[in-house]
Amino acid sequence: MSLWVFGYGSLLWKTGFTPAETRRAVLHDYSRSFCMLSIHHRGTPEEPGLVLALEEAPGETCTGIAFRAEDAESDAVLEMLRARELISSAYVEHEVHLQTEAGPLTSLAYVIDPDHAQYVHLDLETQAGMIARSTGGMGPNPEYLFNTARHLDEMGIRDDDMRWLADRVQALIETV
């Protein structure tokens, strides 16, 4: 069975592997939001940033990209993704069912654990302030936001909160 991975955030622009196949995909009953404190990659424990996570949201949808790993590379890809995504236990690996133009498929996705200390639910203005000032081991938090927003725009995936955040963080950075 092929390894499919659902990209909805940084996997859209930094997969970490060369996919054998990609498909635009929709995940039902989940939403993409900046609901995870980043204390490693895009922030620190003292000055946490925010990264995207999937959270259960009945009635909502999240559009992203399903990436299929080459069968011969599946184990190595899974090991790389786990090292990257499971750096803390805030994400949980889930098997999800995606809808694509080529039909449904089962995929791996990284979903927030709502009981984890890194899970937050903040208003957009608070999110923008945190993102604008945070930097972690993988670089500045605004870079993560801007890359994700740009890729969503390029793929024609509308995300109003993402667009608002990108504009607001840019404005905050320019006033510093």
Image (cartoon, rainbow, N blue to C red):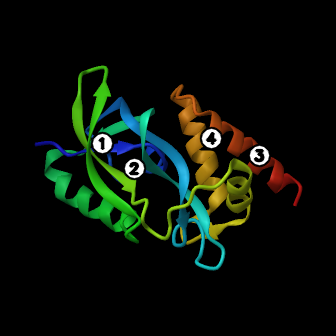
Task: Give neighbour class at mark 4: few <14, some 14-19, many 20+ (Cα, 10 Å).
Answer: many
As drawn, is 110 to the left or to the right of 117? left
Q: Amino acid at mark 4?
A: Met
Q: Amino acid at mark 2?
A: Thr
Q: Amino acid at mark 1?
A: Pro
Disc 4/disc 2 C-alpha distance (Å): 20 Å
Instruction: Look at discs 3 and 1 and give the one toward the viewer.
Output: 3
Task: Give neighbour class at mark 1: few <14, some 14-19, many 20+ (Cα, 10 Å).
Answer: some
> Which of the numbered marks, if any, corresponds to residue 162?
4
Disc 1/disc 4 C-alpha distance (Å): 25 Å
Disc 3/disc 4 C-alpha distance (Å): 10 Å
Sequence-first tag of 3 and 1: 1
Sequence-first tag of 2 and 3: 2
Sequence-first tag of 4 and 2: 2
Report which residue position mark 1 lands on.
19
Under circle 3, the secondary element is: helix
Q: Residue at x 36, y 30 (%)?
A: 25
Find residue 104 and report its horizontal and vertical position in percent: 23, 27
Report which residue position mark 2 lands on.
15
On the rendered image, what quadrant is the N terminus found in? top left
Task: Give neighbour class at mark 3: few <14, some 14-19, many 20+ (Cα, 10 Å).
Answer: some
Task: Give neighbour class at mark 2: few <14, some 14-19, many 20+ (Cα, 10 Å).
Answer: some
Find residue 152 and report its horizontal and vertical position in percent: 54, 35
Find residue 3 and report its horizontal and vertical position in percent: 20, 46
**Residue 116's quadrant in the figure?**
bottom left
Q: Residue at x 22, y 60 (%)?
A: 76
Q: Residue at x 40, y 71 (%)?
A: 88
CB-based contact (under 8 Å), mark 1 and mark 2: yes
> Which of the numbered marks, if any, corresponds to residue 168?
3
On the rendered image, what quadrant is the C terminus found in? bottom right
CB-based contact (under 8 Å), mark 1 and mark 4: no
